Amino acid sequence: MLDSLAALGPFFAVDAHPPGEAPAPPWRPFREVAERPGPLGKGALPDRIASVRAALATAGGRPAGEIDPRAAASAAHLGLVARLAAPALGAAALGGWVDLQPDGLWWQDTLGGPVPLSVPLPVGTVTPGDWAERLLTGVIAPVTEATSRLAALSGQVLWGNVASAVNAAARQAAASRPGLADGAWEAARALFASPWLSRERHPAGVDYRRASCCLYYRLAPDARSARAVICGDCVLGAP
């Protein structure tokens, strides 16, 4: 299962560790991402958002202070939920599952690619019937709610990020392994059926367009160039 996931692409690949054991550093417990910041505003999620904001500033050749903080928070959130959705969806499409619940999930806070994840063994060979709800309620919702609190971002924006990540994962799985396309889109539809994604007006599919915007256009240096950085599935790109 782990090899099959890795073959779908880097967002699907996960490491694994014995159940109940803590992987050696630099692995960190993923549950810290949804924890409330400390007295000085320090914590895994605010630190992650700050790192993403600095990276976006460097990429654009601009000071970090010129990067919209809400856009940076949305970008950090989208990167995290995309990393969570892909292996869960890929495993379901393959007829199995990986345990992504926060108490057993570990991560590395790195930039420049998909966040490394480690899941506890064993990896399941049969997909649980409640896998989609467990993923959304158990791990993605706490990260989404923590981001909303911290950055004053609406649920519509953040759950739109989740829907976009799910659809992108299904599209990537289908492209990487065409024989898996039916299973990938079935898994995406199972996630879209959740009340968490009820704001989405369009079903999962190759023509999906989200009902919100991730705010990435706010990273453009001026209004004239904002149109060029609108994502392909963004509501702002609708004809």
Image (spheres, rainbow, N blue to C red):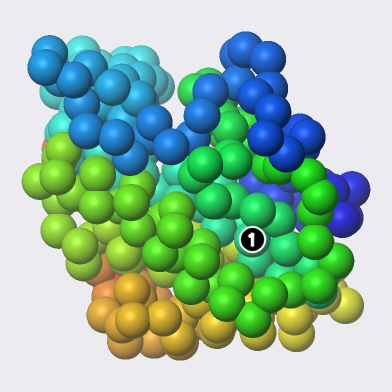
| Three-letter amino acid code of the residue under disc 1 | Ala
Residue drawn at x 56%, y 30% as measured from the top left: 107
Is residue 75 visible from the viewing direction of this image? no
* Label 1 sits on residue: 88
Residue 182 located left or right of residue 31? right
Question: Toward the viewer: 64 or 152?
Answer: 152
Locate the N terminus and report the quarter of the image it occupies.
bottom right
Is residue 119 visible from the viewing direction of this image? yes
Instruction: Tell me residue 148's x, y (percent).
Output: 18, 49
- On the image, which quarter does residue 179 sit in? bottom right
Instruction: Tell me residue 78's x, y (percent).
Output: 40, 48
- On the image, which quarter does residue 91 sit in? bottom right
Residue 39 located left or right of residue 103? left
Residue drawn at x 21%, y 67% as measured from the top left: 156
Instruction: Tell me residue 74's x, y (percent).
Output: 28, 45
Sort mark 1 into few (<14), some (14-19) or many (20+) by Cα contacts within 10 Å: many
**Label 1 element class:** helix
- Residue 14 position (above or below residue 194): above
- Residue 93 position (above or below residue 186): above
Locate the C terminus and report the quarter of the image it occupies.
bottom left
Q: Residue furthest front?
A: 20
Residue drawn at x 55%, y 58% as measured from the top left: 85
- Residue 97 position (above or below residue 214): below
Instruction: Tell me residue 94's x, y (percent).
Output: 82, 70
Question: Toward the viewer: 139 or 60?
Answer: 139
Residue drawn at x 54%, y 51% as measured from the top left: 101
